[in-house]
Image (cartoon, rainbow, N blue to C red):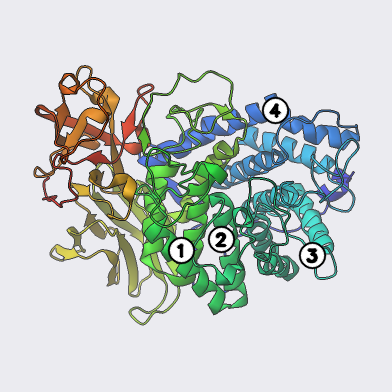
Amino acid sequence: MTSTSSIASSSTATPSSAAVPVAPENSARRGTAVADVRLSPNGFWGRRQEVNGAATLAHCLDWIERLGWLENIDRVARGEVTVERAGWQFSDSEIYKLLEAMAWELGRRDDAELEATFASVVARVAAAQDDDGYLGTAFGHPGLPPRYSDLAMGHELYNMGHLLQAAVARVRTAGDDLLVEVARRAADHICREFGGDGRDGICGHPEIEVGLAEFGRAVGEPRYLAQARLFVDRRGHGSLPVPPLQSAEYFQDDTPVIDAEALRGHAVRALYLSAGAVDVAVHDGDVALLDALRGQWDHTVERRTYLTGGMGSRHQDEGFGDDFELPTDRAYCETCAGVASVMFSWRLYLATGEVRYADLIERTLFNVIATSPAADGRSFFYANPLHQREAGAVPTDGVNARAEGGTRAPWFEVSCCPTNVARTFASLPAYVAAVDSSGDGSTDGDVAVLMQYADGRAVIGDVVLDVQTRYPDDGLIRITVLEAPDAESTLRLRVPAWASDAVLTEPGAESHPVAPGWADVRRAFVSGDVVTLDLRLAPRFTFPDPRIDAVRGTVAVERGPLVLCLESTDLPGDATIDDVSVDTTSAPIASGDGASVTAIVADPDERTPGALPFTSAPATPLRAGATELALVPYHRWAERGPSTMRVFIPTADGTDSTAATDGR
């Protein structure tokens, strides 16, 4: 095994000013460093980030230790024979995702105790690394199968990809250290083993591509980016053995990346691969590959993505279905797929500057990623269906073997989602704002871009902003300029696609409407200048595309960036969610952080006993009178206990008609 003392003494680098998960060296755009955006603990995202740092990180470490996943590392370090190994072959990745979360957390605030914990875990990992750089606990050691003997399902490269992403977080926030050197050794090993003169293989679960690309950029090593490119180019040629009940499509090994029309197969695999492919396309200036990935994003969003931003409609393979195959009650929408979707969309934004990618990030953050963790940060949703027919069981303090249960669970047999949530919340400031140096013709110089709205303070290039907002509970965003260049500069604000009646007020000017897209404010700002953006969060009806068979004749309600849902908790008497239909002739009304709708609740006693659920004439609601029903943000469903729930509710007349949605 590797000597940790010799590695630790080699620290030379210093923290990077680009303390972000993604930093393409030749991109005109860059995200803000994690320490440059300070989210207020009173705001929506600040509260979640505080809980993540105070509770979720320790919760994840406790479970990883409790279940023996870190002991796997220790056993390899001691050179012992493995008789029974704890966890799946990919359990090492949870250690690395947790280290990444810790590194980002330490990058935004000082915490001596967390630093000591981080160093302790890293030392254990380093002790298990082989002399040639290989690092893994499920293969290649006494009592285990040989290295790379199961590329399809072994996850060895996947695990090391997450190691590299953890090292990116560390080198960009703290400089070169033990974890970074361990990652270098692993990356060098991979390049030797799988380079042009090595094995002609790929990993069944993409991740090494994005890990190698970003780590290569972080440490200035082009060999790692070249290896990432090699892995991307090798995929899609049917080289992986296909296990029973699987397919080449499951691994994205059926079609070369540049030739694919849409994302398909296992959703997380597809999205991680796409993120890595954008990385290499941007690095290599490969316009054709980038255009292909943009087309795949378009097709997938237009035809294979849920209203929440969730991706993956099939429990089988945790995968994408066909176009418009979006059943709500069988939606998988894995939390990790939401994280991966943000990774893919963010890279496309950095590459193009297009607002639609930031729009999808907002939708996914609020309605998938924020939905997963409980308020205390110690239990999680793995799958995120849009219709829960049976209330889940009250979770126990144990491992949940099922990904879909209707209640948040403290841990899962496959527990990829808690650590993915942890690293996303810890690095969230990097996705809030960006500096755009593209010189797109409309402005001169760098543009300070504010694209996700959260209460706090942001340093965006040479502009410092204080942002006051209760968003998404309120749509008013008040931005005070604290520092700015003496010359004219541009502040660019994102007006979400749903905000059709947004109003912008510039310093010393009259308020005026702004259309969805980018809204630029250009002037010689002085300290104290205030810009306000009012997004006017009126609840609105949202009707599904009629090609989505599963929800034809239904309607959803959204309010600002939030998808709302009906929970059985809010139903009168013995009514069930199956008894409810919505009167779309009356606009939804804002209520608390949700809305109320005029609904018809059927009388179950009027149904004919023993009759089939079909009729010879169009069905009409069994009316028991109109009533006002509350809808709550989807992200907090099941917080009041086990419940049934649905996002898309039948319309009272059974049609896909549109209705007035301009009520306040």
Residue type, numbered disc 3 = Asp
Residue 275 image label: 2
Does residue 557 appear to the left or right of 406 in the view shown? left
Q: Residue beneath label 1, please?
A: 297
> Along the line of sight, which residue is nearer the eye, 181 or 191?
191
- Disc 2 vs disc 1: which is toward the camera? 1
- Disc 2 vs disc 4: which is toward the camera? 2
> Along the line of sight, which residue is nearer the eye, 500 or 448?
500
- Badge 4 density bin: few <14, some 14–19, many ≥20, Cα 10 Å: few
Residue 62 sits above or below residue 228 on the image: above
In the rendered image, which quarter contains the C terminus?
top left
Q: Residue beneath label 4, please?
A: 65
- Badge 3 density bin: few <14, some 14–19, many ≥20, Cα 10 Å: few
As helix, strand or loop, the secondary structure at mark 3 comes to loop
> Along the line of sight, which residue is nearer the eye, 147 or 75?
147
Residue type, numbered disc 1 = Trp
Res. 550 visible in picture: yes
- Badge 1 density bin: few <14, some 14–19, many ≥20, Cα 10 Å: many
Residue 200 image label: 3
